[in-house]
């Protein structure tokens, strides 16, 4: 079965139909890649060579594809590897080990990704949408509104660029591999389900059809879109699921995370628990601690009780001090209040770790990604 032949419009390789990003090699299944290569008049085995260059050597540069005749590689790259992302600006922090990149997309939409190198792992925080439609009140991207969904290749390209930069030794500490990807950049990944899932498949597929990452090192973070969470559980790819809860009661959560009026706290926690039951993967609960808003001891207790009501050992909590967005009336919790919140959760037997805020001085930390305004 070779699938539907892919028609490539070679007359305008930099534009896709109806404002969609142009189709890219990475958007295609391995069968479709063979069809696409054949349509360009080349032998089917070229598809595997291209996949090896892209996913193993992390390159889309024809000059590096020296096992293909020059004319062949130029034609294939021009037809199948349109430039989707242009690095417009990079900013670094933490002695160069945190790198934020602002990307311009083919249609002028803008997204950011953040690469963080730690002692024993490297994590890339990717964007899945330009902007976001969910309007969480404390989140910088939430204030922008949604521009559009990213395509699979637009997301995978963020990952390839980071992996390549690490392999090239551009981040201090010597050449290394990218070990983790978190969908915690701009956008709600489960609102762009198809492209995000296809991205996950490319990340975990073994070489040469993918990057060969471990599913557990891929984290999909969601506001709690229950039907999509349940669907994710059944995909058979046990990625780590993070639920951005931020409040254990509906009254407050509906203010912080407006989509809570559609799927309540209990419904979101139930779905997270089902995710654990189906996949065996422990779920993360994200909780931005906002001074005097959601950081009360009784809320820690209520959260602990609600999580324990579903079972033990299925969840851990990641409180994070709020990273205030510009002009925000809110600020991070007092450190003593934060410690008390953590202690209460632990007293309920919930493993709890404060999440770090790497890159906050370059607005690269959690919830701070908001692409530059137009000049
Ligand atoms: N839409 C997804 C993923 C993007 S945000 C989600 O909501 O999960 C990634 C994480 O950063 C989420 O847990 C989000 O709630 C959190 N976040 C957003 N704004 C923040 C801020 N100002 N301070 C701290 N965390 C924030």
Image: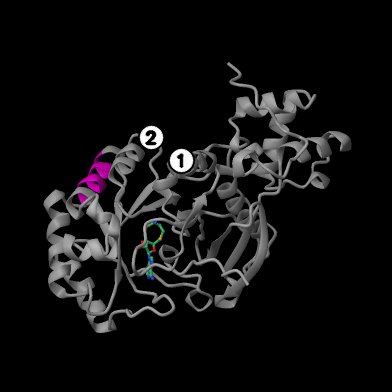
Q: Main secondary structure of the magenta part?
A: helix
Q: Is residue 369 left or right of residue 23?
A: left
| Coordinates of residue 30 in the picture (x, y in percent) | 61, 29
Nearer the observer, 198 or 212: 198
Q: What SS does tag 1 mark?
A: helix
Magenta residues (range): 269-277
Q: Which residue is mark 2?
A: 235
Q: Residue at x 24, y 83 (%)?
A: 336
Residue 197's disc is: 1
Q: Are marks 2 and 1 in contact (CB under 8 Å)?
A: yes
Name which residue lies at 15% across and 74% down: 297
Q: Real-space Cα distance between discs 2 and 1?
A: 9 Å
Is 152 situated above or below 88? above
Disc 1 Cβ-to-ligand 1 distance below 8 Å: no
Which of 327/82 is in front? 327
Q: Colour scheme used in the picture?
A: one colour
Q: Position of residue 290 (x, y in %)?
A: 28, 75
The percent position of residue 193, horizontal first and vertical second, equals 43, 42
Please tell me whether mark 2 or mark 1 is closer to you in this view. 1
Furthest residue in direction front, as rendered? 18
Q: Secondary structure at mark 2?
A: loop
């Amino acid at each position: 079965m070779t699938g539907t032949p892919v028609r490539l419009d070679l007359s305008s390789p930099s534009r896709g139909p109806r404002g969609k990003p142009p189709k890219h090699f990475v958007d295609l299944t391995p069968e479709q890649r063979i069809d696409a290569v054949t349509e360009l008049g080349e032998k089917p085995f070229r598809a595997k060579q291209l996949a090896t260059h892209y996913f193993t050597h992390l390159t889309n540069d024809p000059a590096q594809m020296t096992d293909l005749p020059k004319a062949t590689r130029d034609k294939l790259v021009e037809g199948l590897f349109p430039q989707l992302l242009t690095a417009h600006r990079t900013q670094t922090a933490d002695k160069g080990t945190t790198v934020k990149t602002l990307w311009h997309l083919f249609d002028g939409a803008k997204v950011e990704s953040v690469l963080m190198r730690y002692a024993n792992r490297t994590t890339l925080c990717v964007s899945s949408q330009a902007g976001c439609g969910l309007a969480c009140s404390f989140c910088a991207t939430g204030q922008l509104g949604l521009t559009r969904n990213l395509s699979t290749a637009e997301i995978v390209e963020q990952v390839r660029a980071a992996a390549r930069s690490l392999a090239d030794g551009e981040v201090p500490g010597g050449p290394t591999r990218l070990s983790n990807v978190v969908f915690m950049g701009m956008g709600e990944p489960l609102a762009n389900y198809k492209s995000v899932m296809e991205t996950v498949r490319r990340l975990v597929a073994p070489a040469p059809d993918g990057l060969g990452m471990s599913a557990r090192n891929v984290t999909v973070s969601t506001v709690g879109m229950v039907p999509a969470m349940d669907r994710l559980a059944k995909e058979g790819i046990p990625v780590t699921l993070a639920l951005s809860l931020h409040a254990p009661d509906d009254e407050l959560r509906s203010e912080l995370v407006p989509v809570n009026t559609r799927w309540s706290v209990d419904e979101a926690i139930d779905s997270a628990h089902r995710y654990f039951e189906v996949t065996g993967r422990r779920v993360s609960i994200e909780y931005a601690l906002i001074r005097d808003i959601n950081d009360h001891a009784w809320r820690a207790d209520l959260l602990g009780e609600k999580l324990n009501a579903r079972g033990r050992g299925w969840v851990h909590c990641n409180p994070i001090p709020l990273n205030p967005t510009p002009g925000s009336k809110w600020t991070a919790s007092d450190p003593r209040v934060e410690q008390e919140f953590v202690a209460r959760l632990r007293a309920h037997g919930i493993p709890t770790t404060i999440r770090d805020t790497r890159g906050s001085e370059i607005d690269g930390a959690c919830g701070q990604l908001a692409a530059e305004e137009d000049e």
